[in-house]
Amino acid sequence: MPVASTIGLHLGVATVIERFGTDEQREAFLPDMATFETVGVLGQSEANAGSNKLEMETTAAQHDDEWVLNGHKQWVSGFLNADYVLTYAKTGPDEDAPHNISAFLVPAEEFEVDEIWETLGANSVKSPRITLNDIRVPADRLIGEEGEGYVARGEIHTGVNVPARGVGIARAALEDTAAYTSSREQYDQHISDFQGVQWEIGEMAERVDTARLLTLRAADRADQGHDVTREFAMAKINATQAAVDNANKAVQLHGGLGYTTEHHVERYLRDAKLLTIAGGPNEGHKDTLAKAVIERYGE
Ligand SMILES: Cc1cc2nc3c(=O)[nH]c(=O)nc-3n(C[C@H](O)[C@H](O)[C@H](O)COP(=O)(O)OP(=O)(O)OC[C@H]3O[C@@H](n4cnc5c(N)ncnc54)[C@H](O)[C@@H]3O)c2cc1C
């Protein structure tokens, strides 16, 4: 899963440059990003700007033909192997929110690492807290319009990578469980011969297909240029919870060995839990979904 996350975040940075950058920026950055010669990561969250990114405290001030950035970013996944951090910073007063945040492409070497956490899962990628201390970047490192970085970000849908990862974990948990329970015997029969186990496996399969279809629908409608606020929120909530539920069931149905590192299912459970938090906690997506539905059908 961390590999998919790294690729997804990298493509998200490239998409912002492709959609909102100038021709010069596209030519300067995208060819090397396309071949992974250079890697981009996302610096949006901060200690006090988690679910609500509008609370970010990092600032960028223009001095002649440079921007000077100060603040910090937190949970920058893949930072330790990155070349650029797509860094969101306030360039205008709070009363202009959400039109007061801009995006900058900042070389990773300019940051200082403050803290690298040990995490429950997704262990092959670290997501440190990093500091920007009077970092100076040329004016042409502003990507997109000044003040419109946050709003523009809402127009791209690379976040569909998160529910897609959920589908992957939910599917892997299902396949491992079907294979294990149909080979493990107790009471002179395969575990999968118990009706209770069969129903669990059926429900796991339902979760995979529901999550997959919702995710494909969101991706497909985004590709067609539709507003996918409702579809994306639904896919994110459903697929990430499906990953947690299926991984949890998989551990249970593997018995004691499911609780060991001999099988993959304990890792699925640890990795899956991240997905209901990162990319915005599911509670926030439920708010978004409800608002979209009420807007559509409400009086
Ligand atoms: C391993 C990891 C990798 C990450 N990678 C990146 C990255 O690469 N780049 C990046 O910018 N960010 C990244 N993030 C940040 C991630 O997007 C935030 O953690 C997430 O948005 C939640 O913010 P928070 O942790 O501050 O939780 P908080 O905002 O403090 O929320 C805490 C909890 O409060 C509850 N809550 C929040 N909002 C609501 C609501 N509206 N209704 C009800 N309950 C609510 C939820 O249960 C939530 O989990 C990563 C996070 C982790 C843990």
Image (cartoon, helix red, strand yellow):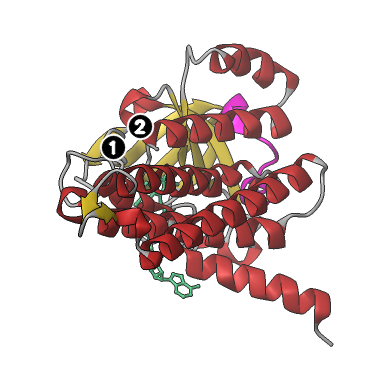
Quadrant in the rendering for residue 114: top left
Q: Which segment is the magenta one? A: 139-152
Which one is nearer the viewer's eye here, 104 or 79? 79
Badge 2 residue CB within 8 Å of ligand 1: yes
54 relative to 266 in the view: left or right: right
Q: Nearer the viewer, residue 77 or 228?
A: 228
Residue 74 drawn above or below residue 186: above
Q: Position of residue 291 (x, y in %)?
A: 69, 74
Q: Tell me which corner region of the image, top left, top right, bottom left or bottom right, holds residue 139.
A: top right
Q: Disc 2 on helix, strand or loop?
A: helix
The residue identified by callout 2 is 79
**Cβ of disc 1 within 8 Å of ligand 1?**
no
Residue at position x 39%, y 25% in the image: 82
Residue 164 falls in image quadrant: top right
Residue 148 is one of the magenta-drawn residues: yes
Write down the residue under mark 1: 126
> Label 1's element?
loop
Mark drawn on residue 253:
none
Which amino acid, mark 2? Phe
Q: Indicate which disc, 1 or 2, sits on the residue closer to the N terminus.
A: 2
Quarter occupied by the N terminus: top left
